[in-house]
Amino acid sequence: MKKLTEIAAFAGLAALWLTAAFGAGYYTRALTTENKDVVIPGLAPADPYPILTEARRILEDYYNRPLPDDPTLEYGAVRGLVNAVGDQYTVFVEPQPHELETQSLQGEYGGVGIGLSKNAAGEIVLSPYPDSPAAQAGILEGDVLLAVDDTMLPGTATGEDAAALIRGSIGTPVTLRVRHPSGEEFTVRILRQSFPIPSVTWKTVDGQPTIGLIAISRFSDKTPQEVLRAAGDLRATGADRFILDLRNNGGGILESAVEVASQFLDGGVVMYETQRNAPEKVYTAPNASGSLATAPLVVLVNHGTASAAEIVAGALLDRGRAPLVGQTTYGKGSVQLVFELPDQSSLHVTAYLWYTPSHRQLDKSGLPPTITVEPATDGSDAELARAIQYLLNGQ
């Protein structure tokens, strides 16, 4: 199956999201159900890579230790093939991280409802989602994960490693051993459930009940509906001006990003897309003039705002809809086709380039902020404070 991709926090508010397959990477996925067999022209189907075959034979005949199993050798060969292309976003992803990435972008998964991150000591730190099975079982914000079932976590364990151990079939139990921030160790048995992963969090700004803050951590299938819900809830409490927080949003699904940008626009161009041997494609917003299309708006960005998040920020900037407050964005203007391979691994292939409504290309340059604000060093949120000032004073 081929899927089309493009990659994506709410400082102090958003939960620590499940570590994605690409860690610090950024991507954009677009959706398609097309299936395609990959054929390499000019190569004999019986043995398309004779040098590789001969190298394998020599290893089998002469290497003085047991060779890794066939899947390990095959994955190594595929990674070498893909790395030879020389594009940082054209990558091979093994089945386990591909499953985690797909579930995250679908907005739900089978687990216990906790976010995973690593602290400065390299430990896996837990952040339970509100009302999740993990929270109900007594998992606390900041707990350190020590073991999953009978598997102790080594210091080299990643968030993906821990997530793979925690996830499993719905209704089956998993036992977590954690260390509370107080130092006390605690063991709990939790039943896995189908659990939604929200991509949007929102609140009214402290002391400013007319300003609503909407933070998007990534663009999943459910993000456009979550943004509409956020706007409705905030308007119900009296908010009529909005801050859209895209900081540290590495991207997600292209169509979701376009739909979210469209909610803040009254028609017109959202982005342009080009690919090899095809005419330029234009993505436009419907002429819908909803409540978000006219409300005063500011967008928060930083160096971690990338890919699909840059699509939204670039559209709102170029269309004169909102200023960008913060730092220059990451600078990724490409879209990856995602081919799901027979063993549930995947191959991400850079296929499309995208441009803002003014035909600005962002690769390696990013979007410059309208108002530059560097992160505060005293624990305060300087970017948010400047956005509030802009909405109150108009500058």
Image: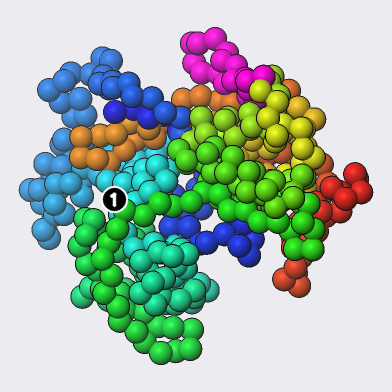
Residue 240 lies left or right of residue 224; in this view the side is: right
Residue 351: horizontal and vertical position, in percent?
A: 46, 25
**84 relative to 275, above or below:** below
Quarter that holds the N terminus: top left
Residue 317 lies left or right of residue 97; in this view the side is: right
Span highlighted in magenta in the image: 270-287
Q: Quadrant of residue 357?
A: top right
Query: Can the viewer see residue 374?
Result: no
Residue 341: horizontal and vertical position, in percent?
A: 25, 34
Who is closer to the viewer here, 387 or 290?
A: 290
**308 relative to 382, above or below:** above
Q: Residue furthest left?
A: 61
Name the residue rendered at 12%, 22% in the picture: 46
Badge 1: few (under 14), some or many (20 or more) residues near its Cα, within 10 Å? Answer: some
**305 relative to 10, above or below:** above
Specify the principal SS of the magenta part: strand
Q: Quadrant of residue 91?
A: top left
Residue 59 lies left or right of residue 125; in this view the side is: left
Who is closer to the viewer here, 168 or 79?
A: 168
Name the residue rendered at 28%, 70% in the picture: 190
Residue 295 lies left or right of residue 179; in this view the side is: right
Q: Which SS class for mark 1?
A: helix
Quarter that holds the C terminus: top right
Name the residue rendered at 64%, 32% in the picture: 263
Residue 276 falls within the magenta-colored stretch: yes
- Residue at the spot of label 1: 96
Who is closer to the viewer here, 264 or 257?
A: 264
Query: Can the viewer see residue 358?
Result: yes
Residue 164 falls within the magenta-colored stretch: no
Who is closer to the viewer here, 200 or 309?
A: 200
Residue 366: horizontal and vertical position, in percent?
A: 68, 39
